[in-house]
Image: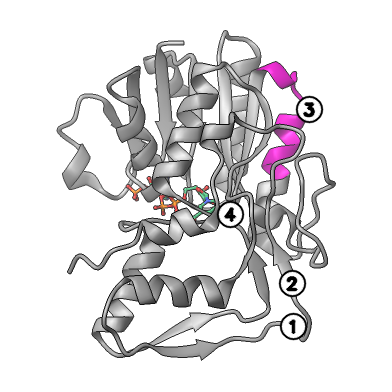
């Protein structure tokens, strides 16, 4: 495994993966609107999933592994992944797809495990399920579905939003009924690096091994960020507790790569 192509390498997760991998592998990436930072970088290609055929980039790069970390128009995402699936079936190439805990958002009473049946009430969750199902129809040795909970970290859009709210005295949304597991960019990219090194394929749940209420988690992070006077907006979506969590069971990674939510909290500092 030498050549890796990351689709969405200018984004939060895609760029974190690029930074983790590029000194070990011949790593390429795509960007869409973030021209300035990437257009002079020979490893990066501009790619618009609504206009361009992903085949053109695949033919240019000839990757051994494609990592898909895209956002964008849902129809166009489905089409692009259809093309990727066609490509990898005829080539010595695998596809790792960044999916989401939302593939289980219709089940609220329990956390979810790798082999549970997916079901979603959201259009985002249904998009992820549609792409997952395309991958589940090809040989398992060709693909990995990486289901990821909410991703935090100092540079994450989620934490930046909290920091901005603290600065401008705006309310921070918390979901008191929501029970989640979590990750950050560092943990996620280390786990993906491990999966690549060990040539792993199949379905993986890449989040903390324990659970916490969203409200408690956000409040602990805000405490970490220092001396603030936060304003919280408590959003109740249901009367009862609801789970949105992807826990590992049948496809565990090595022990030193598993982590608790507390490690994700401890990572946060105020850097303004
Ligand atoms: N962040 C989370 O908490 C989280 C949790 C679970 C799963 N995920 C999944 O992880 C993946 C990456 O998420 P992210 O948070 O890193 O998102 P992000 O920061 O918004 O990055 C999205 C990437 O997609 C590219 N893109 C957007 N529109 C495009 C288009 N029309 N054509 C081609 N490329 C386009 C962006 O390029 P430009 O920036 O250059 O425009 C960027 O590289 C997504 O599939 C998301 O569903 C994220």
Which residue is disc 4 drawn over? 149
- Relative placement, left or right, of 77 versus 47 is right
- Name the residue nearer the viewer: 185 or 44: 185
For numbered disc 1, what is the local secondary structure?
Answer: loop
Looking at the rendering, in which quadrant would you find the C terminus? bottom left
Task: Write the residue at 30% across / 74% down.
Answer: 163
Q: Residue at x 74, y 72 (%)?
A: 242
Determine if residue 83 is in view. Answer: yes
How far is disc 4 from disc 3 in space, using C-alphas? 24 Å
**Residue 261, placed above or below residue 240:** above
Q: Is residue 197 above or below residue 247?
A: above
Instruction: Point out the tag, 3 or 1, that comes first from the N-terminus.
Output: 3
- In reply to whether residue 137 is colored magenta, the answer given is yes
Give the residue pinned by disc 3: 137
Task: Work out whether mark 3 precedes mark 2 in sequence or the reverse, and give the earlier one.
Answer: 3
Q: Range of the magenta residues?
A: 130-141
Q: Residues at badges 4 and 1 in contact (C-beta under 8 Å)?
A: no
CB atoms of marks 2 and 1 within 8 Å = yes
Q: Which residue matches tag 2?
A: 242
Q: Are marks 4 and 2 in contact (CB under 8 Å)?
A: no
Mark in front: 4 vs 3: 4
Which dot marks residue 238?
1
* Label 3 packing within 10 angstroms: few (<14), some (14-19), many (20+): few
Q: Residue 135 at x, y = what percent?
A: 70, 31
Residue 14 placed where, x, y %?
A: 40, 41
Q: Position of residue 53 (x, y in %)?
A: 47, 31
Q: Secondary structure at mark 4?
A: loop
Label 1 environment density (alpha carbons within 10 Å; few <14, some 14–19, many ≥20): few
Label 3 near ligand 1 (CB < 8 Å): no
């Amino acid at each position: 495994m030498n050549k890796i192509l990351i689709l969405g390498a200018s984004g939060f997760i895609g760029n974190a993966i690029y930074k983790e991998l590029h000194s070990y592998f011949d790593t390429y990436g795509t960007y869409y609107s973030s021209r300035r930072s990437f257009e002079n970088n020979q490893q990066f290609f501009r790619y618009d999933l609504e206009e361009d055929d992903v085949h053109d980039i695949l033919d240019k790069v000839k990757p051994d592994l494609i990592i898909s970390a895209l956002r964008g128009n849902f129809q166009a995402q489905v089409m692009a992944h259809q093309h990727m699936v066609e490509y990898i079936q005829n080539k010595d190439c695998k596809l790792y797809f960044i999916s989401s805990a939302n593939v289980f958002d219709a089940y609220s009473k329990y956390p979810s495990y790798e082999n549970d049946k997916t079901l979603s009430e959201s259009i985002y969750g249904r998009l992820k399920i549609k792409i997952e199902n395309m991958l589940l129809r090809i040989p398992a040795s060709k693909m990995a579905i990486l289901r990821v909970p909410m991703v935090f970290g100092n540079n994450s859009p989620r934490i930046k939003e909290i920091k901005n709210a603290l600065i401008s005295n705006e309310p921070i949304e918390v979901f008191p009924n929501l029970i989640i597991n979590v990750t950050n960019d560092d943990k996620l990219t280390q786990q993906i690096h491990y999966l690549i090194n060990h040539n792993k394929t199949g379905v993986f749940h890449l989040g903390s091994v324990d659970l916490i209420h969203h409200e408690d988690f956000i409040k602990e992070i805000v405490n970490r960020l220092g001396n603030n006077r936060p304003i919280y907006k408590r959003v109740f979506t249901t009367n009862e507790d609801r789970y949105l969590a992807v826990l590992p069971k049948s496809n565990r990674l090595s022990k030193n790569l598993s982590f608790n939510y507390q490690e994700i909290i401890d990572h946060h500092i105020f850097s303004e």
